[in-house]
Image (cartoon, rainbow, N blue to C red):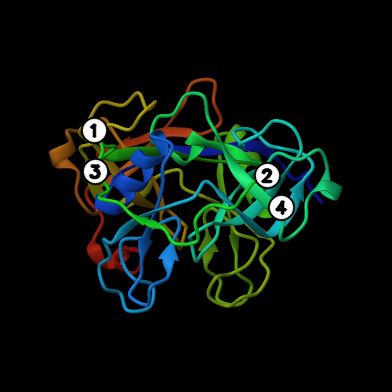
Amino acid sequence: MPDVLSAPLVVEFPFTRSLGPVQSAFLTGLRERTVLGVRADDGTVLVPPVEYDPVTANELGDLVEVAPTGTVTTWAWNPSPRRDQPLDTPFAWVLVRLDGAGTALLHALDAPGPGAVRTGMRVRIRWAATRTGAITDIACFEPYEGEPGPSEPAPHTGEFTDPVTGIVAPARLDYVHTPGRAQSAYIKALEERRTVGERCPSCRKVYVPPRGACPTCGVATAEQVEVGPRGTVTTFCIVNIKAKNLDIEVPYVYAHIALDGADLALHCRIAGIPYDQVRMGLRVEPVWSEGARHVDHYRPTGEPDADYDTYKELV
C-alpha cells in the first residue's frame, strides 16, 4: 500500500456582519460595563438578547438591564486552553444565569481547579481593562460571595453614545488533512506532471480526482487510469472580485474541465486567452507551475471546439 500523505491545513476567514438594534445595544452596553437582555413575549428575560422571539418569532425590543452577578447552571473543565480562548491558564466553561435573567450566558470562569467549581456557585463578571464593544469585554467570570443582584431587571432604552454597529468575527480551523490512499496517489502523480484517476469496476467510469470509491455505485475503486493531459471546458464563470492573498488580476476565468478519458470534470483557471473569449467546448491543455506539483492554469490548444454531445453529460 502506498504511503498516505498528510499535511497541516488552516482554513481562515474574517466574517463581517452589521448589527441590528438589539445586538448593537447589547455589545455597546458591554463596552460600558452594562449587561442588557431583552424580554420575550412570555416575559422571560433573554441574555444574550435576540432580535426575534424563539417561540413566537415576533420581533423583540423591550430591553432591560440585568446584574453582573449570577449562578452557574452547568460547567466543564478546560485543562488545556487553546489559542484565542478567554484565559491562557486552565479554566472552566460555564453557563451563568445572571441575576434578573431567565437564560444562561456561556463564558469562562477563572478558578484554581475543577474542585473549586460546582453547579449553583455564585459568580460575577470580571470586566476587561480595555473594552471595545464585544463579548470579550467580559474578560471572564470569577467566584463571588457577595449579595445577589436585583431579581427584577430594570428597563433600559438601549441608547448609548457612539454605538457599536458592526463586528468582525474571525473564523479559523486548524487541522491535519489526510487525503487518503486514492488522493495521495493522485497528488504524487502530479509531481511527475501526470494526472491519474481511478476506474469503477462496476460502471467503468473514471473519476478524477479519485475518491477511493465510486460515488454512483458505492463500490471501492483501485484501478489507476492516466487521463489527459488535454481536456474540454464544460462550463465556466468569470471572476470579478479579487481574493485576498491571491496574486491573480481580475477578471479571470475559472472553469470545469473534462480531461480526455475522465468521466468527471475538475476545475482550474483558464489563461492564455481573453476572458470574454472562453467558451464551452474550448479545448485546453495544462501549464504546470514552475517548481511546484500542480497545474497553474489551462490554455487553449488551438484545436477545433469539442462537439457538445461529447461532454454534455459532464456539464
Q: Camera-side residue: 209 or 147? A: 147
Circle nearer the viewer, 2 or 1: 2
Q: Residues within 10 Å of mark 2 (few under 14, many from 20)?
A: some
Q: Which residue is mark 1?
A: 161
Classify residue 307 as left or right of residue 83. Answer: left
Q: Amino acid at mark 3?
A: Glu
Q: Residue at x 43, y 63 (%)?
A: 46
Q: Amino acid at mark 1?
A: Thr
Q: Residue at x 53, y 75 (%)?
A: 216
Q: Camera-side residue: 4 or 299? A: 4
Of pointers 2 and 4, the one earlier in the residue sequence: 2
Q: Is residue 26 visible?
A: yes
Q: Is residue 14 visible?
A: no
Q: Residues within 10 Å of mark 4 (few under 14, many from 20)?
A: some
Picture quadrant of residue 276 = top left
Q: Amino acid at mark 2?
A: Tyr
Q: Residues within 10 Å of mark 1 (few under 14, many from 20)?
A: few
Q: Which residue is mark 4?
A: 181
Q: Which residue is mark 2?
A: 144
Classify residue 99 as left or right of residue 31. Answer: right
Q: Residue at x 26, y 73 (%)?
A: 58
Of all residues shown, which one is farthest toward the left?
276
Q: Which residue is mark 3?
A: 159
Classify residue 254 as left or right of residue 208. Answer: left
Of pointers 2 and 1, the one earlier in the residue sequence: 2
Residue 101 image offset from top left, x and y in percent: 48, 61
